[in-house]
Image: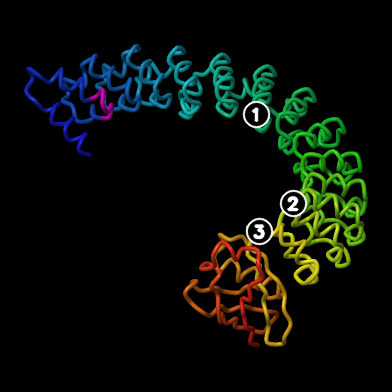
């Protein structure tokens, strides 16, 4: 603010020194031109210095400067959107439009400017920014060369192509290979073309959502799982029971195990593959595998938080000694209930107490309802139709020394119904 005031002061000085002071002012901030006199707004040197610093300063220039091609070219080279402030004649000038779109695709936002954009301008916009087809005329949106250039930069540009080109296999293949999402915008008949579908799945398995049900065979789903195992839930139910499909998915994204059939969650080798990719996938393993030492330690080796889903025997002798190395940078809480039942909650040392209480509630099978500030000792929760109040008798995890990390700590939480 102080700088602007100084600039304005320079601009409003006596005519003998106006030129020098204004030139210095706009070199610091092009927007200082806003406060210049009408005489200085028509001064070519001052205006050119201003737009070189900030293209938007062109809006403060005199009409004659907005019609000066050299000044306008300097402005749009700095900020393409400055073409909006140029004279109507220069907004239709090809050299100006080209310079503007090379700096920013926003230069074509104005309809009158976009209408003046020919093939060379649109191609320049596409090549520089990977977009621009939506600004093109209907004629250019039906031009195969232009559309191919656009979808090779960003396959999603296919949505702006003419209908006949969205039904052109060469164009669609180029689009889905660049961005699988383009499958959603191609002609329906090409969504049933195996080559097109496989190309889209190879690029992004999540686009399985746009594949017609009749096309979701094992080959298509396997191709989708390779880059995006977390898309398993989009596969047909019978393929979520297929071991090859699920194994491919969990090797890429361990948590995909949660979308596999119940039978496959009991498959030891498959679960082992899942927890080696993400230890926390142990949550979805069958109960007997959550007691399997090899699987639990493999999961803990990948991510110590996996012990949240391990059987309680791992927190007692003699397994506790083997488990401790995987928990060195984590807090481990022993949570007791009035009934005498207890469980263990593993949390990162930087978790807030509210985050820990959410994990505790989840472990106890309580659905979180509303929470208060950390300083408040009461947290309301809801389980089925019964309100529960969880009282925090003692929570001091944030005060524990580094030496206590990895040890069992009694959180002393009481649950009253």
Q: Position of residue 104 (x, y in %)?
A: 48, 25
Residue 328 circle label: 3
- Which region shows up in magenta? 26-31
Q: Give the CA distance from mark 1 to mark 3.
A: 46 Å
Q: Quadrant of the N terminus?
A: top left
Number of residues whose C-alpha sits closer than 10 Å to that of mark 1, classed few (under 14), some (14–19) or many (20 or more): many
**Location of residue 265 with respect to 174 vertically, above or below:** below
Q: Quadrant of the C terminus?
A: bottom right
Q: Nearer the viewer, residue 210 or 23?
A: 23
Image coords of residue 403 (percent x, y): 58, 63
Q: Secondary structure at mark 3?
A: loop
- Residue 29 in magenta? yes
Q: How is the image coloured?
A: rainbow
Q: Is residue 9 left or right of residue 342?
A: left
N-term mark: 1 or 3: 1
Q: CA distance from mark 1 to mark 2?
A: 36 Å
Residue 154 tag number: 1
* Residue 2 percent coordinates (x, y): 20, 38
Task: Give the residue pinned by disc 2.
Answer: 302
Write the residue at 78% across / 27% down.
Answer: 173
What is the secondary structure assignment of the residue under circle 2? helix
In the rendered structure, the answer to whether residue 247 lies left or right of residue 402 reads right
Residue 227 placement: quadrant: top right
């Amino acid at each position: 603010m102080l700088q602007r005031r100084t600039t304005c002061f320079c601009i409003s000085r006596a005519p003998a020194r106006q030129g020098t002071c204004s030139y210095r002012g706009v070199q610091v901030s092009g927007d200082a031109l806003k406060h210049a006199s009408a005489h200085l707004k028509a001064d070519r040197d001052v205006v050119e210095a201003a737009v070189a610093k900030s293209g938007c300063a062109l809006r403060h220039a005199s009409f004659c400067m907005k019609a000066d091609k050299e000044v306008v070219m300097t402005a749009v080279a700095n900020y393409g959107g400055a073409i909006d402030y140029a004279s109507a004649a220069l907004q239709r000038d090809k050299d100006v439009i080209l310079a503007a779109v090379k700096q920013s695709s926003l230069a074509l936002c104005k309809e009158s400017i976009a209408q003046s954009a020919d093939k060379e301008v649109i191609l320049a916009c596409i090549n520089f920014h990977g977009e621009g087809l939506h600004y093109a005329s209907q004629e250019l949106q039906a031009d195969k060369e232009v559309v191919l250039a656009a979808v090779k930069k960003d396959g999603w540009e296919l949505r702006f192509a003419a209908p006949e080109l969205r039904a052109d296999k060469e164009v669609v293949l180029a689009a889905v290979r660049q961005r699988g999402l383009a499958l959603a915008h191609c002609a329906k008949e090409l969504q049933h073309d195996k080559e097109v579908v496989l190309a889209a799945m190879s690029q992004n398995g999540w686009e399985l959502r746009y594949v017609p049900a009749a096309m979701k065979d094992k080959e298509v789903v396997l191709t989708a799982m390779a880059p995006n195992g977390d898309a398993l839930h989009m596969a047909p139910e019978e393929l979520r029971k297929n071991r090859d499909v699920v194994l491919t998915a969990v090797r890429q994204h361990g948590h995909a195990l949660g979308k596999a059939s119940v039978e496959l969650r009991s498959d030891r080798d498959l679960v082992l593959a899942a927890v080696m990719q993400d230890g926390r996938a142990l949550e979805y393993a069958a109960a007997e595998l959550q007691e399997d030492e090899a699987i639990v330690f493999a999961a803990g080796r990948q991510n110590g938080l996996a012990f949240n889903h391990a059987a309680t025997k791992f927190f007692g002798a003699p397994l506790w000694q083997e488990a401790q190395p995987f928990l060195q940078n984590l807090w481990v809480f022993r949570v007791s209930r009035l009934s005498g039942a207890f469980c263990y909650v593993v949390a990162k040392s930087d978790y807030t107490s509210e985050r820990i209480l959410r994990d505790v509630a989840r472990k106890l099978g309580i659905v979180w309802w509303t929470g208060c500030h950390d300083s408040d000792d009461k947290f309301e929760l809801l389980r089925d139709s019964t309100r529960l109040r969880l009282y925090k008798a003692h929570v001091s995890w944030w005060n524990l020394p580094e030496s206590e990390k990895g040890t069992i700590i009694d959180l002393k939480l009481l649950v009253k119904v």
